[in-house]
Image: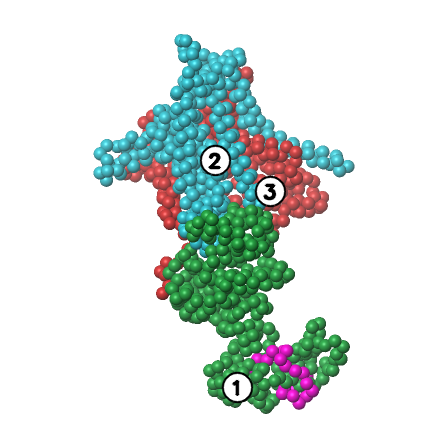
Chain colours: A red, B green, C cyan
Amino acid sequence: MARSRSFDVRRQAGFPAVAITCFILLYLPIILLVVYSFNAGKSIAIWEGFSLQWYVSAWENEKVQDATIRSLIIATCASVIATSAAVMAALATTRSPKFKGYSVVFAMINQPLMIPEIVTAVALLIFFAMIKVATGYTGLWYLILAHSAFCIPFAYMPIRARLQGMDLNLEQAGADLYGTPWRVFRRITLPQLWPGVLAGAMLAFVISLDDVVITEFVKSAGQDTLPTYMLGQLRRVITPEVNAISTVLLAISVALVIAFYLLTKSGKPKQGDVQ
Amino acid sequence: MIEIQNLTKTFGTGAEAFTALSEVSVTIRQNEFFTLLGPSGCGKTTLLRTIAGFVDPTSGTMTLDGADVLASPPYVRPVNTVFQNYALFPHMTVAENIGFGLEMQDRPKAEIKQTVGEMLELVQMTPLANRATSEISGGQQQRVALARALAPRPKVLLLDEPLSALDFKLRKEMQIELKRLQSETGITFVFVTHDQEEALTMSDRIAVMNEGQILQIGGPKEIYDHPAERFVADFIGETNFLEAELVSVDGEVAETRLPSGKTISTRAASGRAGAGKVTVAVRPEHALLEPPGALIDGKLENIVYFGTDTHYHVMLDGGARFVVRRQNQPDAVEAYTIGDAVGVSFNPGVGQVLRD
Amino acid sequence: MAETREISAARRRWMLLAPALAILVFAASGPLLIVIMYSFLTPGDYGGVIWSFSTDAWFNVVAERDFFDETLSFSDAHWSIFWRSVKLSLMTTAVAFLVGFPTAYFIATRPKATRDIWMLLIIIPFWTNLLIRTFAVMEIIRNEGVVNSVMIGLGIIDEPIQLLFTEFAITLGMFYVYLPLMVLPIYASMERLDFSLVEAAYDLYASRWRVLKRVIFPLVKPGVIAGSILVFVPSLGAYVTPRVLGGGKQLMLGNLIELQFGQGRNWPLGAALSITLLAIVMIALMVYVRSAGREEVSHG
Ligand SMILES: Nc1ncnc2c1ncn2[C@@H]1O[C@H](COP(=O)(O)OP(=O)(O)OP(=O)(O)O)[C@@H](O)[C@H]1O
Ligand SMILES: [Mg+2]
C-alpha cells in the first residue's frame, strides 16, 4: 500500500515550528504593549481592568500635545521636501542612459541607508552647532532639513521603481502631439507616476515620524518630538501613558505601511505597459 | 524488474480531484529501453515521478527487483532521473555535478574520482570537467545531466523528455548517443517522449498512454503495424479507418466484411470474439491504388506530392475518406488524374481490427 | 546640433538632481567631513573644540594618558566597549540567521497566494517605530514583566531574574528589531530558488540535511550574506536599543560616542570614535560588495 505520508521535497523538519515561533516573537511584545495601554491601573505589568484613562491623560498632557504637533510638522515638511527632491532625482536617473557620475549620485542618495545613524547624528550636531553660533537661528528648520535628507532614499526607491516600469513611448507620443516637456510631464508622466509618489511620501512620513537618534542629537532645547519625548520618559517610572502614545504611533505606522503595500501592489504598471 | 500493479494517482480532493493515473499496470524488464509515449498531459511525467519517488500514488503497488519501494523516499531508491530542464547545480562544476550522487552515498574519494573520470569519458566531456555549468552549451549540459544520473550506477535511469530542448540535428545525435549509452552500461532506461518517431526509433518496447491509462504495450513494429485501439492507431503515424462487419474470429485472424460486400482477412487483438460492427485500421502505405473494381471503389479527390512519396486522397463510395501513399519512382508517369474513378485494395493480414 | 542637445540634456539632468544633492550634501555627506576635521582638534572645556591641531583624540580611541605621569596605557574601558559591540552584533547576526533562515524558507515554500501576506507580517514591524519595539521588549523582560511573572507563576523560579540591563537584553532587543532585515534578503533569493535542483539532489541520494547544506544553502548564500550585513551594520552602531535595554551600564559604541557629546564632553574623541565606527562599517560593506560581485561572476 502507499505510504501514509508523501515525500515533499520542500519540507525541512522543524522549519515551520521555528517560523511560527518567529512570528509569535515578532508580535507578542507589541500586542502586550497595546493591551497594557488600556490598563486601568498604573502598572504596565499587572492587569487591573479596561480603561481609556491613559489615552485621556496623554491627550491632556501639554508636553505630549506639543511634541505631537512638532512631530507632525516635521514629518509633513520633511516628506514633502524629500518626495519633491526624490521625484526630480528619479527623473534624472531613470530617463536617460547611465551617465558619468551616476554611481556617485546613486551612492549619495543611498548614503543615509549605509552610514550608521549615530555617525550622521554626531556630524549634524557638530555642523549645526557651528551654524547656530554663526547665525543665532535655532528654529525647527535644522530638524526638517536633517529629516528631509534621510527620507530622500526612502521616497526615491518606490518612485524610481515606478518610473522604470513606465512606457517611454507614451511620453514620446505626448511630445509628438505638440506637448511641451513640462506639459507632457504634468499630463502624462505625473498621473502614471502618482502611486509611486504617494507611496514614497508615505514611507518618508513614517520614517520621519519614527526617528529618534538624529532628532535627539540635532534638536535644540525644548524641541522634543514624540519619540524623543518617549525616550526621555523611559528613564523615569513608566506609566501606561507611554503605551498609549506608542499604540497611537503604531496604529499610524501600520495603517500607512498597509496602504503603501496596497498602493505598490495594485498600482503596478500592467503587463502591457512594460516594454 | 519494475512491476507496477493497478497504480492510481488522484491529485486534489472533492470537486477539484483529478485522476492523472488510473489503474496503470506495467512490467519493465531488465536492460530494456522502455518508452512512455503519449500526448501532453496524459500522465507520463506523473508515472515517471512515481517511480522516482516524488509522487505518492493514491493506490496500487510497485516493486523494484521484487522489493516494495513505494515506502522508500527518493534518496534511497536505486533510481536516477535525467530532468527535463537538466537541473544541474549552478554552484558546482561539471565534475562536481557528476560526482554529487556518489558523494551523497559516501563512497570513498578515490572511487568518486575514478568514476567521475569514467563518466566524463563516456559522455565525451573530459576537457570541460572544471567548467561551470553555465559555461557549457545545451547539448553539453544534457550530457552532464546524463553522466550525473549514470554515475551512481542506478538500476533504472528515468529520462523525462530529455531531448526536447535540443535542436533537430543535436536531437538526432543524442538519440544515437543514448542508445549507445544504454547498451554500454546495461542499465534499464525508462524514457518519456511525446515524439512518436523518437519512440519508434529508440525503444525496445513502447507503452502508449492517454488520459492516465496505458492503452497498449509492445515493440515499435507491433505498435505501428498492429495498433490495438483507435487512439494508438491515430496517434502513431497516419491511419485509415474503415467501418466493417466482423464475420468470424480464429485466434488472431479475423474475417471482416467491408461495406462494399467483399470479405477480407484481417488481424485482431487476441481474445477478440463475437460479431458486429468493428473498425479496421489500414496504414496508407499498406494500401494500393487500382482501377475500379478493387476491394473498395471511390473517386480520386486530390493528389499531394511530398517528394519521397505521393498521397492519393480517395472519397470512398460509402462517404468515408481514404488515403493511399505510394513511394515515388524516378521518371514515373502519373497514371491518375483528379476526378478519376479508382479502387483501393490491400493485402490480407494488413488490416487491423481495433478494440472498441 | 546633436552635441548641443546632449549638453542641454546633461544640464537638465543636473538641475533635476540639484535639490536632492544639495539637501544630502548639507545635511548628510558634508557634515561627515567636518567630523573628520574635528577629530584632529583639541577638546574645549565645556564641549565644543579649541581650534588647535591635536592627535590626542585618535590616541584616546584605543589608549589613555595617565593624568599625572602622562604615560600611555591601553584603554581597558574603550576596548571592552569595542569588544562588546562586536560580540553582541555578531551574536545578534547569528541568532537572527538561525531564526530568519527557516522563517524565510517557510515563507518561500507557502503557496504563492499567501506568501505576500506572510511577508507583510515580517515587514510591518520593520516599519514601526524602533523605540517602541525596544520599549515593548523592555516591558516583557523587566523584573515585573511577563517573562518573570510567568516563570514565577509556574514555580520555575522564586525570585525574578535580572534580565533587563544585561548583555542578554541588548542582544535580544537588537535581534528583535533587526530580524526583518535578515528575513527580507534571504526570502528574496529563496523565492527564486529552482526546486527541481532540490529534487535532483534527492534523486542523487542526498538526505534532507545534506540537501539543505549542499544545495539550498549555497544557492541562497548571497541573500544570507546580504541579510547578515544588514543586521550586523546597524547592530554595531546601535544607540537606542543598548541605551534602553542596557540601562547605561552595558555601553556599546553608539553610547560611548554619545557620552563624548554629553557628560564626557570630549567632542574630538567622539568624532574619532564615529569615524572608527564608520570605517568598520565601510569595511563590512566592501567585503559584501566583493563577495556579491564574485557570486555573480561565478553563477553567470
Ligand atoms: N501536482 C499536481 N497537482 C494537480 N494536478 C497535477 C499535478 N501534477 C500533474 N497534474 C495533472 O496531471 C496530468 C498529467 O500530468 P503529467 O505531468 O504527468 O503529464 P505529461 O504526460 O508529462 O505531459 P507533458 O507531455 O506535457 O509533460 C495533467 O493534467 C496535470 O495537469
Ligand atoms: Mg511531462
Q: In this view, does C44 lie to the left or right of A58?
A: right
CB contact under 8 Å: marks 3 and 1:
no
Q: Is residue B135 visible?
A: yes
Q: Is residue B281 magenta?
A: yes
- Which stretch did the figure color magenta? B276-299
Along the line of sight, the residue nearer the viewer: C173 or B268: B268
Tell me, for residue C229, which label it has, or none: 2
Chain holding disc 3: A
Q: Mark 3 points at which residue?
A: A163
Q: Is residue B91 left or right of residue C63?
A: right
User: SS class of the residue under badge 2?
Assistant: helix
Q: Where is residue C236 in the image (x, y as percent from the top left)?
A: 44, 30
Q: What residue type is labelled 1?
A: Ala
User: SS class of the residue under badge 3?
Assistant: helix
Marks 1/2 same chain:
no
**Mainly helix, strand or loop, the magenta region?**
strand
The mark lying in front, picked from 3 and 1, is: 1
Between marks 1 and 2, how big is the CA–CA gap? 80 Å
Disc 2 residue lies near ligand 1 with CB under 8 A: no
Q: Which amino acid does label 3 sit on?
A: Leu
Q: Position of residue A31 (x, y in %)?
A: 35, 40
Q: Name the residue under label 1.
A: B254
Q: Position of residue C80 (x, y in %)?
A: 39, 24
The answer to which quarter of the image holds residue B333 is bottom right
